[in-house]
Amino acid sequence: MLPELHTERLVMRELSLEDGPVLQAFKNRPEHLRRQAVEPGEYADGTSQVQRYYEHRGADSARHLFVYVAHHRTRATIIGDGGLSRFFHPALASLGFGISSEYWGQGYATEISSRLVEFGFDALNLHRISADVAVENAPCRRVLEKIGFVHEGTARDCIWAQGHWWTEAKYALLARDYQNMRESSRQFTTTELPCG
């Protein structure tokens, strides 16, 4: 079982079988599919998706999938999800996140992704976290840039989904960049400014 992760407004816990129908309901909405290079049927059965996660996540030090759902501290409903997938090397991972559309524009994607990045570098000792996002998904790209990810390039027409080719923007954040950002933030908050 993964440790709970907390943010100012959210409690994040590992995905469970009971979450399948809730995730299915928001991931299949037209407004979500317009921004995702996935086939509409990919999340047709949320419970099966969660079962596949448990079958393929790996165990202990060999674990390669870390998927969380996020609850608002004062509401019982799931507002979004996010995860890290380790691949090729245990110090490399990719980041993914999603927010139910009724909570868009309120900073929750930034909260979820920031907390997962912190977990990845501080708890999993990752060296690099990458993220691929459809160029049409401007809000997701803004979140990545806001939390320090660097745009490394674009893969043109790299995914066929929903009857057309999708182009993806490639982003990444290195552990040293993350540490530098934390150090800068710490300096900023601890530096005393002269009073006028």
Image: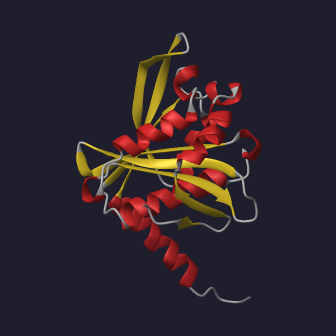
Q: Is residue 131 visible?
A: no
Q: Is residue 136 above or below residue 19?
A: above
Percent of width and height locating residue 31: 70, 28
Farthest residue, direction left: 89
In the image, 101 versus 22, the foreground residue is 22
Percent of width and height locating residue 91: 27, 54
Q: Residue at x 42, y 20 (%)?
A: 156
In the image, 116 versus 77, the foreground residue is 77
Answer with left or right where residue 80 lies relative to residue 55. right
Q: How many marks?
A: 0
Percent of width and height locating residue 172: 39, 46
In the image, 94 versus 11, the foreground residue is 11
Q: Is residue 95 above or below residue 116?
A: above
Q: Is residue 66 visible?
A: yes
Res. 55 image quadrant = top left
In the image, 51 versus 148, the foreground residue is 51
Answer with left or right where residue 111 lies relative to residue 57. right
Farthest residue, direction top: 163
Q: How is the image coloured?
A: secondary structure
Answer with left or right where residue 91 lies relative to residue 151. left
Q: Residue at x 49, y 41 (%)?
A: 50
Answer with left or right where residue 33 lies relative to residue 4. right
Query: Which quadrant of the rendered structure holds the C terminus?
Result: bottom right
Query: Which quadrant of the rendered structure holds the N terminus?
Result: bottom left
Percent of width and height locating residue 184: 47, 71
Q: Is residue 182 above or below residue 113?
A: below
Q: Residue at x 46, y 32 (%)?
A: 169
